Image (cartoon, grey):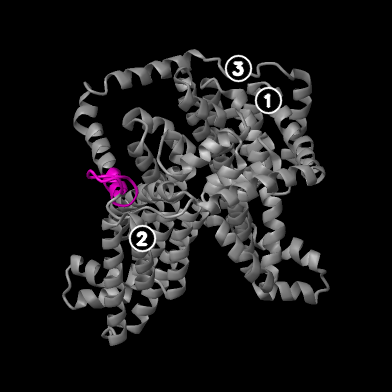
Amino acid sequence: MTSQVTAPVPARRPVWTRPYLLAGILAAWLVLWLIFRGQATLPLGGAELTPLHERIGAAADVIDDSRNENPLFLYFVNYIRLFIDQFVTFVQALISAPSFGRPVPVVGWLGVTGIATAVAVLYANLRVALLTAAGFASFGLLGLWRESMDTLALTLAAVVLSLAVGIPLGVWAGLSDRFERLAGPVLDFMQTMPTFVYLAPLTLFFLIGPASATVATMIYAIPPAIRITSHAIREVPPETVEAGASLGSTPWQLLAKVRLPLAKRTIIVGVNQTIMAALSMATIAALIDAPGLGKTVLKALETLDVGTSFNAGLAIVIMAIVLDRVTSAAGRRVETARRAGRARRPLWRRVQVTAVLAATAVLVYLSHVYVWAAVFPGEAGLGSHVRRAADAASQWAQANLYTYTNALKNVVTYGLLNPFEAVLTGSPWWLVLLVVTAAALVLTTVRVAVVCAACLALLVALGLWQDGMVTLAATLVATVLVMALGVVTGVWMGRDGRADRVIRPILDAGQTMPAFVYLVPILGLFGATRFTAIIAAVVYAAPVAIKLVADGVRGVPVSAVEAATAAGSSPWQVISKVQLPMARRAVALAANQGLIYVLAMVVVGGLVGAGALGYDVVSGFSQLQLRGKGLAAGLAIVVLGTMLAALTKAAARRADAAAHGRL
């Protein structure tokens, strides 16, 4: 009788050893930091340039000088810039700028308000139409009609171009697995990269102005259009497609008659997300001379004029709410109509449509012919009242809430930010590289560790190590605060349906607001400091983290919670031993998204005293001699974003694997 010898199974490293290994790495880091503190930290002054920065600046000068000679510009880039400039100018001529020899736009304020209200009536409902009319009227009352229409024109132009590119590509991705696999990493990179870094490179090719702003907005707005359209096409029931094919429909007929009609509701959600992304980016693009409300906010932030920035920020928020409500209601109406079938439109509805179109035509005619209907009447008294009230509120808050705001600032600054920053900026660059790589090996995979090492080495090569570490410290501190807020509030919402119903609409509204707007009230409360950028990042990133954690906690099986409760577990034990461990994938995803949102906002915070890489980028826009450094800073932000995204995605995958018992 022979005995079968089995090959030994390699021992798997126990999961419990990871915390000990990580603690050992951090302890060794602190010891080595005490020994080597201040050595090889690669500091660089604000006006100092490395040879690489000078070479990048020289390359940018060469690009500028060859703009009218290089074939790439003569036969490609210049034509694209000309087309986009003319398209944006045409939309501005229609609704915002004097044009065609007239002292006013083709359609004045009354006509634009009528068109917007008519769209809301026809595609949404009466309540949304009233909100739309009030919202557009408020732009004039705030004294910002021209600026608001410039922002709307740039947003509409970018949305039209984004949808013209994004929907066909989304359909392709929905029909082709190969194309979806190819497009996925590109879209991930476009959505991971902070919006700030699009701007500087685009100005090299498209110059400052509407063309660069529109292209930057498209880069930010196209990914949601592609992803959501692809998802919509793939969600069409296969049996419906098979039924159409069995009747002899061609692939084109299946697409036009089956897939697209059934996917229309979800595609409109993609249109909604594209519009919100475009509006957000159109305001930030004021840094490259994009017209509109963003420029007003930017100038006010530069002079710390809280009243003016709040007034313009309020107009941006109103525009975001109106656009979001109209497109969301339109999506719901499409779904209702689809469920009702292809019944003939009732007579009252046809009469309503005719009446709305006729009234809109009259308003457009009046605004085209008469000055009173073209130029918003009044002296914009509401805007001056808002500015004065915002200034008074800011002064009152800084005078009366100083004890509390200063205490909060000191706790975060001295308890978190300064220690993080001291260790990161005081450690030799090689020590940080070794520690991060070792930690990545323990927590993730060899591939991710290599990515982290390469990113940190590239940060050294870019000559912006210390500024990168300052930005990284602020990002990590803000992310810690976001996750603390996300876990506490998310668990509360996940366990309490009433809390969810109250808090979720507030979070949804927060996600509709462009990033620029968050800086305004926080600037009025805390002044221009690096802490302002951190709090703005927390407010900007918290909604998505909270919602992800809440959804994860709610997704924990009720049976598991009931079993733990029946076994005598307290609420805290149920949360810490059952719900959070079983929702760890959602928590890891919240950390991933929180980091991405935080990094995007921290670098924007360079406008209000955050310094570091964000300030380097802004300086590159405003000072020609620092352009090379600004471009390098943009690349450094991408490097940090890539490293952080790789770490958090790997953590999310590990959490998913652990949730399914594979670790």
| Position of residue 353 measured from the top left corner of the image (x, y, whole percent) | 29, 76
First to last magenta residue range: 87-104
Mark 2–mark 3 distance (CA, rounded to whole Å): 53 Å
Q: Are marks 2 and 1 in contact (CB under 8 Å)?
A: no
Residue 100 on the magenta span:
yes
In-image side of 234 versus 457 (left or right):
left
Camera-nearest residue between 623 and 439: 623
Give the residue drawn at x 49%, y 35%. Answer: 638
Which is in the foreground here, disc 3 or disc 1?
3
Mark toward the start of the polypeptide (2 vs 1): 2
Give the residue drawn at x 37%, y 69%. Answer: 265
Residue 643 in view in this figure: no
Which quarter of the picture shows residue 368? bottom left
Task: Quickly name the residue at label 3.
Answer: 45
Task: Quickly name the residue at label 2.
Answer: 110
Q: Which mark is residue 403?
A: none
Give the residue drawn at x 47%, y 67%. Answer: 131
Task: Quickly name the residue at label 1.
Answer: 425
Label 3 packing within 10 angstroms: few (<14), some (14-19), many (20+): few
